[in-house]
Amino acid sequence: MSGHSKWSTIKRKKEKTDNARAKVFTKIGREIAVAVREGGPDPAGNSKLKDCIAKAKACNVPNDNIERIIKKAAGDGNTDNYESIIYEGYGPSGVAVIVETLTDNRNRTAGDMRHYFDKFGGNMGTSGCVSFMFTREGVIIIDKEDVDEEKLMEDALEAGATDFLTDGDVYEIRTEPNDMGAVRDDLEAKGYKYLTAEVDYIPSTYTKLESEEDINNMGKMLEMFEDNDDVQNVFHNWENEDDYEG
């Protein structure tokens, strides 16, 4: 994911994601379980759980799976104890990277994250070493097909959005982090279907990789992060990610 230019990259990776549905379900399942543990099993009174359920549905997780995860997480016998840990560091040529994880073994996860950074010419840093280069914003992506741009912009701003962007064949709506769920729900109630709706780290500046070696190493590093079950999201400021062939 790379700020407002990320959607083309997500589309490029979508086939991989679709071929690894079980992995996607596992990651979303962890998010739901943590949300239930922190705020209870009722989405009406747990906004974080409500956001997780919306994300699950957007990723085509069946309702039965969602209900089963919530029920298990709310049960007395549930021993899953995931904690949220954010890792920061640098990829090749100083690309800033933030990795959000949910883990039940911080030593294993820290070792994996450090290994991925080191293996591909980067290095893991301390907390805060790159996060100052990003801002937290809600990001709602809506397909342009059959959507009136001016009407959507009007509805989005009326719902509380802070910005409205176009990127290829999608519209991107920005919100304050705490307003994302409400804006998403408002637009959904008006009949809009969203592709993704999440709170992201948006880079304030971007780094362009020039050498083929750096491009390949950065692409492989991101793939290693995304293939790890403990990793929920990866954010970076790599400008020319589309140059990576995979």
Image: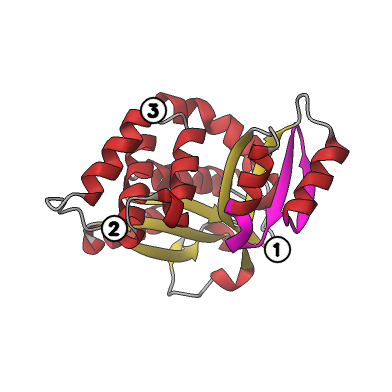
Tell me: 19 left or right of 176: left
Give neighbour class at mark 3: few <14, some 14-19, many 20+ (Cα, 10 Å): few
**Which element carries disc 1, helix, strand or loop?**
loop
* Residue at point 72%, 48% (across, down): 173
Could you tell me if residue 129 is visible in this image?
Answer: yes
Q: Is residue 161 magenta?
A: yes
SS for callout 2: helix
Residue 20 covered by magenta stretch: no
Q: Please name the residue that numbered disc 1 is placed on.
A: 205
Q: Secondary structure at mark 3?
A: loop
Please give left or right for residue 157 compared with residue 45 in the image. right
| Residue situated in front as seen by the camera: 75 or 141 | 75
The residue at which mark 2 appears reads as 37
Q: Is residue 121 visible?
A: no
Q: Position of residue 207 (x, y in %)?
A: 66, 58
Q: Disc 1 residue type?
A: Thr
Query: Is 180 on the left or on the right of 53, as rendered?
Result: right
Start and end of the magenta stretch?
160-181
Residue nearest the viewer, comparing 232 with 207: 232
Instruction: Give the residue at mark 3.
Output: 62
Residue placed most toward the observer, 197 or 202: 197
How many angstroms separate mark 3 from mark 1 (CA)? 38 Å
Between label 1 and label 2, give the one nearer the viewer: 2
